[in-house]
Amino acid sequence: MTTILIVEDNHALASGVALHLRGEGHEVFVAESGTKALAIARKRAPRLVVLDLTLPDMDGFDVLRAIRADDELATVPVLILTARPPELGALAGFRLGADDYVAKPFRLLEVAARIAALLRRSGESPNAPGRERKVPEPFRCDLFEIDPAKCEVRREGALVPLRPKEYDLLIALLGRRGSVVSRADLLREVWGYDRMVMSRTVDTHVAELRRKLERDPAAPEHILTVRSRGYRMV
């Protein structure tokens, strides 16, 4: 039985998600405040946290920071629920270590699909059994270089700190050797989602990669958008 913690002060919303997850055989705890959420997380060590950003006693980002600062909880997958614009909610959450986000209002089945995918991937390495893939050749350009064998990315010689999903996304693009890869394929390969899941997660992570690696993120030279098709690396 998998333990899941839902942090949400909207009782009806939290109850609906909890009821669905319990029906799938999960053990679910619900916290309506950040303080209660952290107490439950430290006591129950959930395998996944569903986190609303707007709580009555503290900001959801503060809860996320506390989770990532706790050695016992540092790697637990966190799915953010937010009504905030992507640049204020999802992007900031990713920078603090969130794994994915769902914008409010949302469909219950959408949240359930995201949770199932995150649970499948929790504890897996990028080359976990059953998801084996060939390690791409090193990539070098005028600005940055990627060494997949060492899992290192450097920009002008300086090591670039990437979140796990950012690195996995970069390697997925690199492995296509310049070919276009669709958002759906990236969602499946990097996040483990099926084709029924629609998400702007890929776009948000691409924006972060460009911020960290490109000379001008607004006019990228290497991580390119191919309109209506997806992305490619050149």
Image: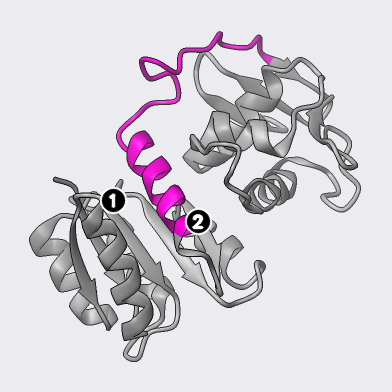
Figure check: 66 above or below 116: below
Q: Mark 2 is on which residue type?
A: Glu
Q: Secondary structure at mark 2?
A: helix
- Distance of mark 1 from mark 2, alpha carbons? 25 Å
Q: Secondary structure at mark 1?
A: loop
- Judged from this view, the residue extending furthest toward the front is 23
Q: Which residues are magenta?
A: 109-138
Q: Which mark is residue 141?
A: none
Estimate the x, y position of residue 87 in percent, counting from the top left: 67, 68
Q: Mark 1 is on which residue type?
A: Ala
Figure check: 126 above or below 21: above
* Residue at which label 1 appears: 74
Estimate the x, y position of residue 228 in percent, counting from the top left: 87, 42
First of labels 1, 2 by sequence position? 1
- Image quadrant holding the C terminus, namely top right
How many residues crowd around disc 2 within 10 Å: few (fewer than 14), some, or many (20 or more)? Answer: some
The residue under the point 72% across, 18% down is 176
Figure check: 33 above or below 224: below
Estimate the x, y position of residue 72 in percent, counting from the top left: 18, 50
Q: Which mark is residue 110?
A: 2
Q: Nearer the viewer, residue 15 or 96?
A: 15
Residue 126: within the magenta? yes
Does the image show residue 66? no
Does residue 144 appear left or right of residue 114 in this picture? right
- Image quadrant holding the N terminus, namely top left
The residue under the point 81% across, 23% down is 141
The residue under the point 19% across, 50% down is 25
